[in-house]
Image (cartoon, rainbow, N blue to C red):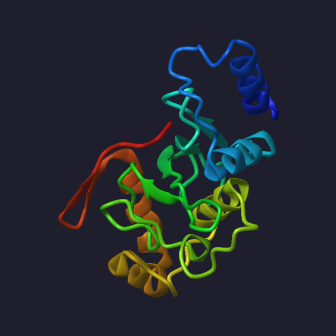
Amino acid sequence: MIKLFSLKQQKKDEESAGGARAGAGGKKASAAQLRIQKDINELNLPKTCEIVFPDQDDLLNFKLIISPDEGFYKGGKFVFSFKVGQGYPHDPPKVKCETMVYHPNIDLEGNVCLNILREDWKPVLTINSIIYGLQYLFLEPNPEDPLNKEAAEVLQTNRRLFEQNVQRSLRGGYVGATYFERCLK
């Protein structure tokens, strides 16, 4: 587990070693790095979520894996990439779904329609808030604010067909003219 004061300790170690550590360059941690460190240390992940850091030294870029255990998407495995910019926490992270999914609030390019990633973002919100928001999209897709208008229309007019389309997309197959890779865990 990442320690809350590891950046402070690292800085102390560098100072006591005369700043001679390779790659240290005497750089201070940015506000975004300090805040993301705090957010990660305070994470309270639901059992259906997992975070992966492809580069352990880069806390500003990571992946979230959501594996819903109920609802339309039960049994699926969905990967989201998070890119946290230097403007964080004043600017929200960039979040993209890397798993192609038949969902009213996620388009086929992976863009996510979640209000707290856009107009409702506030600096007091955390990575944890976003994770719970994304998880909620899989429990309660919102056809009122769609990115995939076709999926939203089917959800509103024929819930049974929507469920069949989701299952077909999870197993791997065509929904209309669009092919979905299998994403069952």
Q: Residue at x 50, y 28 (%)?
A: 55
Residue 21 visible in this rendered orientation of the protein: yes
Count of numbered circles in the view: 0
Residue 79: image x %, image y %? 48, 45
Residue 77: image x %, image y %? 51, 43
State whether residue 34 is above or below residue 129.
above
Q: Nearer the viewer, residue 19 or 155?
A: 19
Q: Residue at x 36, y 81 (%)?
A: 149
Q: Residue at x 55, y 44 (%)?
A: 60
Q: Nearer the viewer, residue 131 or 142?
A: 131
Residue 63: image x %, image y %? 52, 41
In this view, which residue lies farthest toward the left?
A: 177
Quarter residue 177 falls in: bottom left
Q: Nearer the viewer, residue 111 or 77?
A: 111
Is residue 67 toward the left or the right of residue 151 in the image? right
Is residue 32 toward the left or the right of residue 1 in the image? left
State whether residue 126 is above or below residue 18.
below
In this view, which residue lies farthest toward the front?
A: 18
Q: Residue at x 56, y 82 (%)?
A: 119
State whether residue 142 is above or below residue 173.
below
Residue 1 visible in this rendered orientation of the protein: no
Quarter residue 2 falls in: top right
Q: Which quadrant holds the N terminus?
A: top right
Residue 90: image x %, image y %? 63, 68
